[in-house]
Image: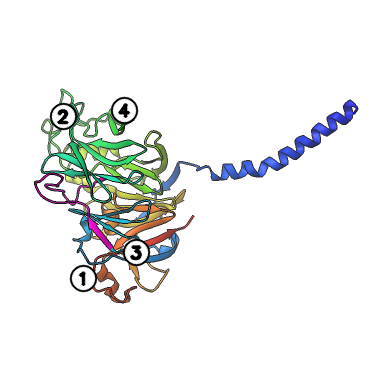
């Protein structure tokens, strides 16, 4: 074969290889998440017209939870599913249901004996390991955590405090790593690095959250607080108001996401080692920023200052976009509500009238207030967002129950919303 023919043959083979590999390469690039997405709230405004479910969901399904054990007020409930789609409803106990909604058992025993919980506060969440099927349950009577399997077997307990006597709040266990933050928003600051000698303070400390390897007992990740240099003066050294929990968090399929309540980035992780920015929030010009919120926590503002701002509350982050709570000043009655912004989208309005159900005939408005009021309640799996709805909502004007046996006093109904891709 001549050199010219050899060159032509090599050129042809190169072109064939390039053509055959191009689609595969394009498919790989298409599957790679283009993070971070943007959530644009720069022009959001209150509206009496609610958004529609079809803006973020394709379909809606319902799961009736049996009344073998009656659940308390929905404000105190949190829910998630394990690998086998068993349902867990958390309150002062943890109730396990089958995927079809039949009650299996209460996981915890309340009492003073071995393997019992003295006092699990319903507003304080347990930390689940959905890969290895166990849960850390905070026992406030003993200032420790108890460990239970998801079948209710007691597996021991350990102290909430670390070696320096700082209390940890665990959020989840992922990839043999415990994701936690230190309790920081209390009536008085008493943690290291929170108050300087001149009375200036930042209640969040130099790091926002941590991931500790269970097997090696070592912290492998610390998320720096890039705004720790912001330290307003406290009117009285160490004084602060209790502003609730500093983290929003939840599950998105097999991943875990979290956001500091006063900062603009929502992080997502698959392994509790790499925390990648998932969403970045673009603020309204009048929205309170981190410095303003820290000043408010340490009582360095007047009520006039407080009433002049817009506030972004808790969020639920999903693969379709972000649900958010929003308010203006102290006008909670007229300018407080909820909205949804698609990924890389721009939110125009939020409303206090829930979301209009244009997917079926059972529930005209879908109220997400209880789901977004506490931003640790959104659970997403396999493209579905799971929310709870009070049973009596299906008996209000314009609604009808999806199950013949459902009554107004039944347990809440678990709703499955298939999110748009």
Say left or right for 301 vs 419: left
Mark 2 nearby-residue class (10 Å; few <14, some 14–19, many ≥20) = few
* Residue pointed to by mark 4: 216
Q: CA distance from mark 3 to mark 4?
A: 39 Å
Marked residue nearer the N-terminal end (1 or 4): 4
259 w.r.t. 99: above or below: above
Where disc 3 sits, the SS reads loop
Residue shown at 39% from the left, 37% from the top: 271
Q: Earlier in the sequence, mark 3 or mark 4?
A: 3
Asked if 314 appears above or below 211 in the picture, the reply is below
Taking 99 as reference, is 194 above or below it?
Answer: above
Instruction: Single out the mark in the foreground, 2 or 3.
Output: 3
Q: Position of residue 134 (x, y in %)?
A: 28, 45
Judge whether residue 287 can be spotted in this image.
no
What is the span of residues highlighted in magenta in the rendered image? 103-128
Q: Is residue 76 above or below residue 231?
A: below
Within-10-Å neighbours for mark 1: few <14, some 14–19, many 20+: few
Task: Write down the residue under mark 2.
Answer: 165
Disc sitting over residue 100 in the figure: 3
Q: Quadrant of residue 186?
A: top left
Question: What residue do we see at 39% from left, 36% from top?
Answer: 275
Q: Position of residue 213 (x, y in %)?
A: 32, 31
By secondary structure, the bulk of the magenta-drawn segment is best described as loop
Q: Nearer the viewer, mark 1 or mark 3?
A: 3
Q: Residue drawn at (34%, 36%), measured in percent from left and top?
A: 176
**Which residue does the numbered mark 1 point to in the structure image?**
409
Place residue 368 in its image quadrant.
bottom left
Q: Secondary structure at mark 4?
A: loop
């Amino acid at each position: 074969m001549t050199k010219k023919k050899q060159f032509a043959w090599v050129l042809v083979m190169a072109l064939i290889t390039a053509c055959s590999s191009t689609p595969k390469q394009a498919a790989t690039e298409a599957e790679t998440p283009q993070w971070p997405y943007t959530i644009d709230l720069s022009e959001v405004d209150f509206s009496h017209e609610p958004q529609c479910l079809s803006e973020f969901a394709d379909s809606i399904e319902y799961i009736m939870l049996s009344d073998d054990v009656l659940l308390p007020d929905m404000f105190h409930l949190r829910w998630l599913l394990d690998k086998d789609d068993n349902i867990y409803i958390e309150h002062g106990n943890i109730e396990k249901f089958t995927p079809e909604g039949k009650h299996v058992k209460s996981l915890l025993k309340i009492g003073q004996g071995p393997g019992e919980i003295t006092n699990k506060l319903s507003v304080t969440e347990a930390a689940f390991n959905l890969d290895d099927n166990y849960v850390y349950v905070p026992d406030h009577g003993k200032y420790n955590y108890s460990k239970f399997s998801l079948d209710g077997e007691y597996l021991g307990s350990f102290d909430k405090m670390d070696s320096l006597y700082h209390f940890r709040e665990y959020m989840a266990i992922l990839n043999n790593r415990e994701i936690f933050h230190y309790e920081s928003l209390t009536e008085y600051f008493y943690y290291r690095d929170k108050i300087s000698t001149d009375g200036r303070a930042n209640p969040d400390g130099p790091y926002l959250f941590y991931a500790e390897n269970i097997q090696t007992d070592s912290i492998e990740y610390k998320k720096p607080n890039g705004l720790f240099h912001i330290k307003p003066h406290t009117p009285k050294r160490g004084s602060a108001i209790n502003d609730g929990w500093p983290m929003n968090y939840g599950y998105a399929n097999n991943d875990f996401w979290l956001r500091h309540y006063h900062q603009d980035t929502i992080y997502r992780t698959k392994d509790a080692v790499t925390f990648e920015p998932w969403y970045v929030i673009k603020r309204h010009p009048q929205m309170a920023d981190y410095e303003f919120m820290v000043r408010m926590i340490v009582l360095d503002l007047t009520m006039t200052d407080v009433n002049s701002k817009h506030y972004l509350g808790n969020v639920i982050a999903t693969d379709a976009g972000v649900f958010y709570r929003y308010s203006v000043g102290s006008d909670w009655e007229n300018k407080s509500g909820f909205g949804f912004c698609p990924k890389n989208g721009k939110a125009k309005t939020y409303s206090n009238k829930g979301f209009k159900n244009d997917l079926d005939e059972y529930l005209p408005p879908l109220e997400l207030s209880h789901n977004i009021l506490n931003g640790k309640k959104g659970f997403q799996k396999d493209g579905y967002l799971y929310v709870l709805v009070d049973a009596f909502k299906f008996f209000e004007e314009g609604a009808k129950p999806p199950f013949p046996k459902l009554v107004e006093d039944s347990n809440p109904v678990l709703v499955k919303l298939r999110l748009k891709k």
